[in-house]
Amino acid sequence: MIIARSPFRITLGGGGTDMPNFYSKHGAFFVSAAINKYIYVALKRNILDTSIRCQYMVTEVVSETKNLKHDRARECLEHFNINNSAEIVSIADLPSGSGLGSSGSYIVALLKCLHRMHDKKINRYDLAELAFDIEMNRLGQPVGKQDQYIASLGGLRKFSISTTGVVSSEELLIPNLDDFYDRCKIYFTNTTRNASKILAIQHANPPSVEDCMLQIKQIGIESAAALESGDLNQWGRLLHRHWETKKQISKKMAVDSVEELYTELHSSGLVLGGKIIGAGGGGFMMLYIPHNTGKVNDIMENAGFKNVPFSFDLNGCDIVEGGNEKILL
């Protein structure tokens, strides 16, 4: 059995510019961080059982790969011409559909397992690009490149994408990292969503959306500079600007109760900025709290929103069992 561990992510600036319809015209810039919350994917070939078994929220047992309803598992297996005698099991620290890049992280982990099973080497950039190709070109999902790349590479990074789709990245260092962890909090809003519906609006790319995304790209550039200089309050203000700009794309960015609570917190000065992580619509909310973290935590907890402590994952997707490369769980 081979087990891969792949991190979830949070976006700290420029999110959404990684969509092909945008970067093909304007290039992309965004800041992304892998966090220490993971999806684990286990893969094994069966000796006697010729069926394909795929276990996630449900368990599928089919005679051939093409019959799998789990489209991402199906495409990954078909890429390696596996049609029978395989079992895939996945389990995650956090729910899917919560805005943390779970689908991209899943594909990266499964492809990592499949390459190890076939004793094939692949670098982290090529692994991410293959995962993107499967989601975007084979499955036709309106996705960008952020989730696959940060899951594969790990760390806190600033990314650029050229108009031809070439991805480059650099590590981003926050000089006052402990202060960042103290002031930046994420909360589960008890809602999940299908990102595809919201991303489809951006994918259609009407002029109004394009104008918003150009602003968000600039906010991403300014966010990287603020973080690198240690000006966390400025980053918090940029987070608010990002959210206000993103809401112009779709009224579905946040449910009313979440938006009302955020507006109250921001108006009172308890938070300088915040946003729904990912495409929007539900999942996790990120808040930047300059002071009174305990008070904001109490308000969020009383509203039913659970704080999830995090730190940055520096490894990216790795094999944790089933090869020479092992990490203690």
Image (cartoon, rainbow, N blue to C red):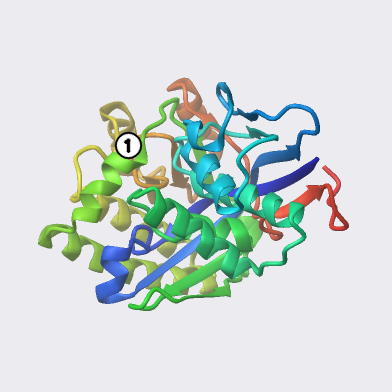
Number of labelled discs? 1
Q: Is residue 182 visible?
A: yes
Nearer-the-camera pick, 77 or 206: 77
Does residue 299 lie above or below 155 as drawn?
above
Q: Is residue 153 left or right of residue 259?
A: right
- Please tell me in which quadrant of the rendered image residue 194 appears: top left
Q: Is residue 188 left or right of residue 120?
A: left
Residue 83, image x, y percentages: 60, 40
Q: Is residue 185 left or right of residue 92?
A: left
What quarter of the picture does the C terminus occupy? top right
Residue 140, image x, y percentages: 34, 50
Q: Is residue 90 left or right of residue 195?
A: right
What quarter of the picture does the N terminus occupy? top right
Does residue 61 lie above or below 22 as drawn?
above
**Residue at the (48%, 51%) spot, across then down:** 290
For disc 1, the marked residue is 281
Question: At label 1, which amino acid type do we have?
Answer: Gly
